[in-house]
Amino acid sequence: MQGKIALEEHFAIPETLQDSAGFVPGTYWDELQKRLLDIQDVRLKLMDDNGIETMILSLNAPAVQAIPEHKRAIDIARRANDVLAEEIAKRPDRFRGFAALPLQDPDAAAEELRRCVTELGFVGALVNGFSQSEFVDDGNTPLYYDLPQYRSFWAEVERLDVPFYLHPRNPLEQDARIYQGHPWLLGPTWAFAQETAVHALRLMASGLFDEHPGLNIVVGHMGEGIPAMLWRIDNRNAWVDVPATYPAKRRMVDYFTENFHITTSGNFRTQTLIDALLELGSERVMFSTDWPFENVDHAANWFDSASISEADRLKIGRSNAAALFKLDR
């Protein structure tokens, strides 16, 4: 398929490059860092070779979210966004941008998002999970965005009418004891999905989408396992009549199918895609690769031959993202 749009596609600046060093064995690090720092060379060739017209680029993880010092987090976010804007300006026909945001400080994050959207032309934000703040337990407590202090930030996201991509990061060390002795479960194997799924469910249960029904949240990797669990999440012990213990007014399936979109990033399996289509419909699934942590050709070759209708392939490969991010205007 030609003309695909991919939207979980990462880059790094020198200040954040080492954040990605632990995700591949040392023998692969030279290759990964070259991929992360390249935008205009190998990346463009791979796009051309695999039918990708546009990539929406975002900073690597955890980067800004793992910087407890507010001033430095704000500086790194702004620097990364300025670098990305300069790269997009070289090929605005091929690249668009997601803002990196210092959500340690909700007001500063709202201000930076506003700058990125109104001045730099970015099409949304991608944030690498929870943030750490020097003012909360010396940075040792994760700050999830269902907390009350983030409501004004979400109001600004809704006002700007741009999507928010909730991207994974590993849990903090003290919260990762379940993985002790099994480090292979950290990262993309399992911990990324579990951490992001819990964060997304917290947002849903908090009543956020009752207050701000216009929000559009994107999660990757075919929904971080949530589509397969939607029925059980809403129907646990259905014969027991007890009141909900959270503020949300509706079922989680309602929020997930109305306020969330998912991508195929890093999860190239047709059976999983079909389950997602059955749960959400083809209008809420979008193609992505997860470059440079996954190969562009692996993603594209799988998607182009997946056993789905050509109408759905066009929606997932291009038209859904074009509409959500207003790319054809």
Image (cartoon, helix red, strand yellow):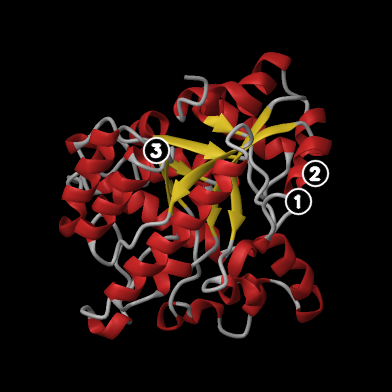
Residue labelled with disc 2 = 45
Which amino acid type is shown beneath numbered disc 2? Lys
Residue labelled with disc 1 = 41
Which amino acid type is shown beneath numbered disc 1? Asp
Could you tell me residue 255's position as x and y percent?
A: 34, 35
Which amino acid type is shown beneath numbered disc 3? Pro
If you read the primary sequence from the N terminus, does the residue marked by circle 1 or circle 3 appear first? 1
Between 267 and 47, the residue placed more toward the observer is 47
Around disc 3, counting alpha carbons within 10 Å, would you say few (fewer than 14), some (14 to 19), or many (20 or more)? Answer: many
Relative placement, left or right, of 205 versus 253 is: left
Could you tell me residue 275's position as x and y percent?
A: 61, 33
Q: Residue at x 64, y 41 (%)?
A: 288
The numbered dot on residue 163 is: 3
Could you tell me residue 214's position as x and y percent?
A: 28, 30
Q: Residue at x 48, y 67 (%)?
A: 62
Around disc 2, counting alpha carbons within 10 Å, would you say few (fewer than 14), some (14 to 19), or many (20 or more)? Answer: few
Q: Residue at x 75, y 33 (%)?
A: 303
The numbered dot on residue 93 is: none
Q: Are marks 2 and 1 in contact (CB under 8 Å)?
A: yes
If you read the primary sequence from the N terminus, does the residue marked by circle 2 or circle 3 appear first? 2
Q: Residue at x 73, y 23 (%)?
A: 308
| Helix, strand or loop status at disc 2 | helix
